[in-house]
């Protein structure tokens, strides 16, 4: 038995005894799918967006900025939209735990819907920061179906409300918006009943999600799967905590191996990869987003200002002047 197997054995034993798992997921569980995380100092999305012509990197998810200029968000969304990326082994592990009735809930900060694409049922998922699953107008709150929004995006149009012509955005929680009511309602029921808490791929810096692992009962078995110690695991660790500073997919493989379901994990993963896999690497994806945003920024700079538009005759005005001159000449 390897060192990792020994570390994970208490989790496997608890699951085998019938205890259920509650997940607390961050962007780190999706990076192996090719989706860049947001906060890594060098490779994260914010670090790369900071190089571009935005007032600040997070502006792409800022509601006030979106109301003023939604184009950067939709440039990003066109690259990150669900359906282009395959669920990771970690996502598939969640699906397998659901299938064997070992799953209690999945609290996720991610907007990529990869839990859904892996086959995790809606009743288990709490998307703390919303997702691309539904879309509403930011003005009148009318809903737009996903196919209409995707059609607008494909035709390089900013999705606009068919009722009031306001901008439409997916129901992702932007800076300046509150979290879904369902998040607080569900957590108030779940918090006292968590048996196994698996916290994975998160910096635990964004509130109120960051508080969740600290609010589970003292009898809960907590495990952190991450690149570094974070949040409650760093500042207020419990004696029973299990901390694994390693790759999320590797831990999924190891845990499924201890549960005797590793073959099923690999089967699901390969099937999902063939269905959704995106040919780009994470680095290529970030580069594409950068280039698109740079191109749009340059085009915007080249557009004439309102003052220039007022002083520069439009084509239609010029044609009308020429026609008037011709009529005058004919009168002579």
Image (spheres, grey):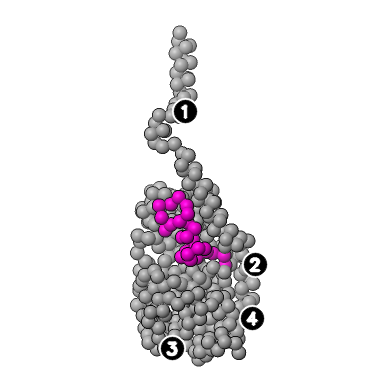
Q: Nearer the viewer, mark 3 or mark 2?
A: 3
* Mark 2 burial class by Cα count in 10 Å: few <14, some 14-19, many 20+: few
The tag earlier along the polypeptide, 3 or 4, is 3
Q: Look at the magenta stretch and give its main secondary structure.
A: loop
Cα separation between marks 1 and 3? 76 Å
* Mark 4 burial class by Cα count in 10 Å: few <14, some 14-19, many 20+: few
Cα separation between marks 3 and 2? 39 Å
Task: Name the residue carrying label 2.
Answer: 274
Q: Is residue 47 above or below residue 100?
A: above
Q: Nearer the viewer, mark 3 or mark 4?
A: 3
Left or right: 272 in relation to 186:
right
Q: Quadrant of residue 190?
A: bottom left
The tag earlier along the polypeptide, 3 or 2, is 3
Cα separation between marks 4 and 2? 17 Å
Task: State the image coordinates of residue 58 (x, y, percent, origin top left).
Answer: 42, 58
Task: Name the residue carrying label 4.
Answer: 263
Task: Name the residue carrying label 1.
Answer: 316
Q: Is residue 97 above or below residue 324?
A: below
Q: Does the magenta portion include 309?
A: no
Q: Identify the magenta region.
A: 33-58
Disc sitting over residue 240 in the figure: 3
* Mark 3 burial class by Cα count in 10 Å: few <14, some 14-19, many 20+: few
- For the C terminus, the image quarter is top left
The tag earlier along the polypeptide, 4 or 1, is 4
Cα separation between marks 4 and 1? 68 Å
The answer to whether residue 307 is visible is yes
């Amino acid at each position: 038995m390897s060192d990792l197997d020994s570390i994970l054995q208490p989790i496997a034993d608890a699951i085998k005894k019938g205890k259920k798992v509650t997940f607390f997921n961050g962007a780190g569980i999706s990076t192996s799918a090719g989706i860049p995380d947001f906060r890594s100092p060098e490779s994260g999305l914010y670090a790369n967006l900071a190089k571009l012509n935005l007032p600040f990197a997070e502006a792409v998810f800022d509601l006030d900025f979106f109301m003023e200029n939604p184009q950067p968000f939709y440039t990003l969304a066109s690259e990150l939209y669900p359906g282009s990326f395959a669920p990771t082994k970690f996502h598939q592990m969640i699906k397998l735990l659901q299938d064997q009735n070992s799953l209690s809930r999945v609290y996720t900060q991610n907007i990529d819907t990869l839990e859904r694409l892996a086959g995790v049922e809606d009743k288990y998922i709490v998307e703390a920061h919303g997702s691309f699953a539904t879309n509403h107008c930011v003005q009148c709150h009318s809903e737009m179906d996903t196919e209409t929004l995707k059609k607008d995006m494909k035709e390089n149009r900013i999705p606009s409300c068919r009722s009031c012509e306001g901008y439409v955005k997916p129901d992702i929680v932007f800076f300046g918006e509150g979290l879904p009511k369902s998040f607080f309602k569900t957590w108030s029921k779940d918090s006292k009943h968590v048996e196994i808490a698996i916290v994975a791929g998160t910096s635990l810096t964004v509130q109120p999600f960051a508080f969740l692992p600290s609010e589970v009962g003292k009898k809960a078995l907590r495990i952190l799967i991450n690149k570094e110690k974070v949040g409650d695991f760093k500042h207020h660790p419990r004696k029973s905590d299990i901390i694994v500073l390693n790759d999320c997919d590797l831990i999924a493989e190891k845990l499924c191996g201890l549960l005797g379901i590793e073959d099923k994990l690999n089967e699901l993963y390969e099937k999902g990869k063939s269905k959704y896999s995106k040919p780009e690497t994470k680095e290529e994806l970030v580069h594409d987003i950068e280039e698109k945003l740079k191109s749009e920024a340059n085009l915007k700079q080249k557009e004439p200002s309102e003052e220039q538009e007022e002083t520069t005759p439009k084509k239609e005005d010029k044609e009308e002047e020429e026609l008037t001159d011709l009529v005058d000449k004919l009168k002579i």
